[in-house]
Image (cartoon, rainbow, N blue to C red):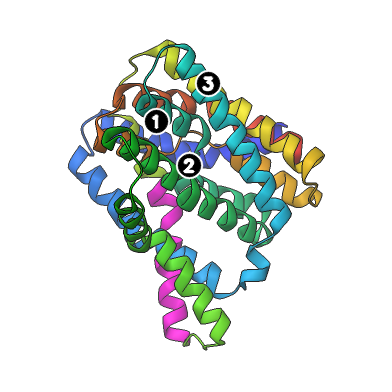
Amino acid sequence: MLAIFLETVPFFALIGLGYGAARRGFFSETATAALTKFVFFFALSAMLFRFSASLTITEIFDARLASAYLLGTLAVYGIATAVAFARRQDLQTAAIEAQTAAIGNAGFLGLPMLSLLYGDAAVPSIILMLTIDLVVFATLLVVLVAGAREGRISAQIFRSVALGLLRNPMIMSISAGLAVSALGLPVPHVMSEFVTLLGNAATPCALFAIGASLASKSAERLAVAGWLSFAKLVLHPLCVAAAVFLIFPVTPFQAAVAISAAAMPVAGNVFMMAQHYGIAPQRVSAAILISTALSIVTLSTIIGLVR
C-alpha cells in the first residue's frame, strides 16, 4: 500500500504546487483559466488523439465493461438524487448534486495517472468510461435542468446537447483518432512527434491547473459537500465494484481500472456547469476541494487494494 501511495505522490505534489502558486498570488485566476483552456483544447486533446489513433472501436468498446460502469454510476446518481429529494431540494439542484456524486476527474487526473500506473493497456477502458461520462451523464444533466426550467423536454434540448457534444474537444479528438485508425491512414513521423510532444504536456499542466483552480474554491456548505465527497470517493467505486464483479463480470484488469477511475475526485467541469446554470456552485466548489484533498488517501488506498 505504501508503494502505491508513493507512486501517486508526484501527481498530488503537482496539484499541491499549483494550489500553492495560486494561493500565494504567483499564479492568477486569469492564468489558471488560460492554462486550463490550453490543456482542454490542445494538450489533452493531443493525448487522446494519439491514444485513439492506435486503437480500434472494438478495442475501446467492451459491452460488459460499459454496462457495469454505466450501472454503477447510475446507482450512485440515483442515491444522490434520492438524498437530495429527501432534503427537499428541487429537481435542478438534485441533478447537480447527483452529477457531483457520480462524475470524477477522468480527463485531467484519471487518464494521465492511470495510464502511467497501469500502462497503456488501461487506456481503452479509460477512454470508454470518459466517453460515457461526457455523452450519457452530461446529456442527462442538461436534459433534466433544461426540462425542469421549460416544464417539458423538447427536441431543441437534444439539438443543443448534440451540438455541444460535437464541439467538445475531447469527443472530437477521440473521434478523429478512431477515424484515422479505422481508415488505416498513416500518421507522418513529424505529425506523430508533434502530437506526442503536445500530449506530453497534458499531465503536468493538467495537474498544476487542478491545484491552481482549487485555490479559488470555497469550503461552504460543508455538510452537503462532505456527503457528496463521500459519495464520489467511496460509494461510486463500491457501486462500480459490485457491478464489475457481480452483475457484469469483466477481467480482473478491467475491473481494477474501472474501480480506480470511479474513485477519482469530483470533476471540475461539474462546477463549470453548476456555475453556468447558477445552481449550487458553492456546494459543488466545496465538494471538489474536499474530495480532491481526501483523494490523496482514498485514491491511493483503492488503487492499492484493486491492484
Do callouts 1 and 2 mark residues in contact (Cβ within 8 Å)? Answer: no
Q: Is residue 120 left or right of residue 144?
A: right
What residue is disc 1 on?
96
How many numbered dots are placed on residues in this image? Answer: 3
The residue under label 2 is which amino acid type?
Asn
The residue under label 1 is which amino acid type?
Ile
Query: In the rendered structure, which segment of residues is drawn in magenta?
Result: 189-206
Residue 105's disc is 2
Residue 82's disc is 3
Discs 2/3, front: 3
Q: Is residue 9 above or below residue 83?
A: below
Q: Is residue 63 left or right of residue 39?
A: right
Q: Earlier in the sequence, mark 2 or mark 3?
A: 3
Q: Position of residue 104 (x, y in %)?
A: 50, 39
Q: Is residue 75 above or below residue 251?
A: above
The residue under label 3 is which amino acid type?
Ala
Do callouts 1 and 3 mark residues in contact (Cβ within 8 Å)? Answer: no
Q: Position of residue 220 (x, y in %)?
A: 33, 15
